Amino acid sequence: MSRRLITASERSKLDPFIVATGDASPRDQRDLMERPFFSLAKARRTAPILYESAGVRVEVYAVPEHGMATIWDADVLIWAASQIVEAENLGFKTSRFLRFTPYQLLTAIGRQTGARDYKLLKGALARLQSTVIRTTIRHGEHWRRHQFSWINEWEECTTRDGRVEGMEFVLPDWFYRGVIDRSLVLAIDPAYFRLTGGIERWLYRVARKHAGRQPKGWLFEIAHLHEKSGSLVRISDFAIQIRRIAARQPLPGYRLRIECQGRREMLRILPAHLSTAPVDGAVETLGTSHANGIGISHAALSGLRTHEPQLTLWPETAIPGLNLESNSESNSCSWPARSADKPASPAAQASEPPARQPSLPFGRKPRGKR
């Protein structure tokens, strides 16, 4: 009989980074912006993503219980990166082990804070933990491939009546190192969180990474974009959605233009001059109408990691146990592979929403649809 090795929680070995500010400018990790690491559909996806280009390989696997982490779930990682960079800019020590209140996270990324939203947040954390990534990006001299999940472990702190007061999670070392290396982080427009479609959210990240503020922008072949997206829709349907997005021009700070070169359809991404402030400059506060009063102001920061109201949620002498419910073999990788470039079944092709479909928190499907 085989025995499962039980290891100690990483949290017992790491100093906690206690999030005490809510006005960090949003920042994204470069490697996540240009390659297919997330599902672009709100419907549950279990088909893996297999992508290789210029010697770089990305594999993303999901378990049927939770499905693959979505591009809406990735807002959690954007928020975490933003908080880490902001704290380090202020001279405070950070860690892969984050402690925070759900209210801080949800309001910062433009979500509501009702009971349903807290439940959806927990679903996002479960998908981030159970999704397994294998990649050769940023490999060392002797290490060729990294395997990890977006969140190593997470837990919530609740009152006796079940009210969630605090959360904590541990980020993987691969992601954390990509955040503390400032050359691998880019500021993004806060309006990104208001983009409703999965493809347009992904397209904004591609635009921010490649076009930046270059006067001539960046030119992509639609077929190449389809491959980079990891989308399960047919390339013809993907091209239709790109044309619709270009017609609506929803990307903050960028304009899209469809061009043709012979029989090849191209998309040119251009900075929107004079229409918005450059996102490389002072990015506006992560503001929504209900986000005021999160944490404390920069002027009042004196000891980010010893903010008393936060510490009372997690007594150092009684750190809660592991969240075993969501820790379902997240490092196992025994699912059948399927190429993301292979045409999907009609049911899978229909899993991505039309460009105008209203956004639902963390990729949840509309009620009544299962």
Image: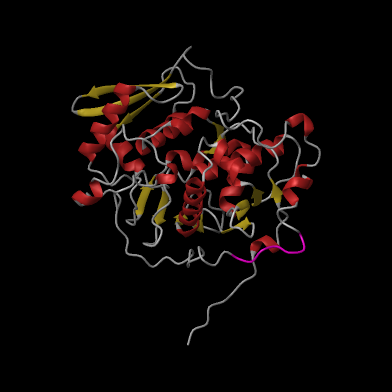
- Residue at x 44%, y 42% (from the top left corner): 361
273, 261: nearer the viewer: 273
Residue extent of the magenta highlight? 316-322
Residue 174, image x and y in percent? 56, 52
Confirm whether the magenta stretch covers residue 319.
yes
Q: Position of residue 268 (x, y in %)?
A: 34, 24
Query: Relative to residue 49, is residue 65 depicted above or below?
Result: below
- On whether residue 190 falls in the magenta region, the answer is no
Pick whichever, 299 or 60, lies toward us.
299
Q: Is residue 133 left or right of residue 20?
A: left
Residue that sits furthest to the top in the current view: 274
Q: Is residue 342 left or right of residue 36?
A: left
Residue 64 figure quarter: bottom left
In percent of the image, x 28 and y 36: which residue is there? Answer: 354
Is the residue 99 above or below the residue 275 in the image?
below
Q: Nearer the viewer, residue 119 or 333?
A: 119
Q: Main secondary structure of the magenta part?
A: loop
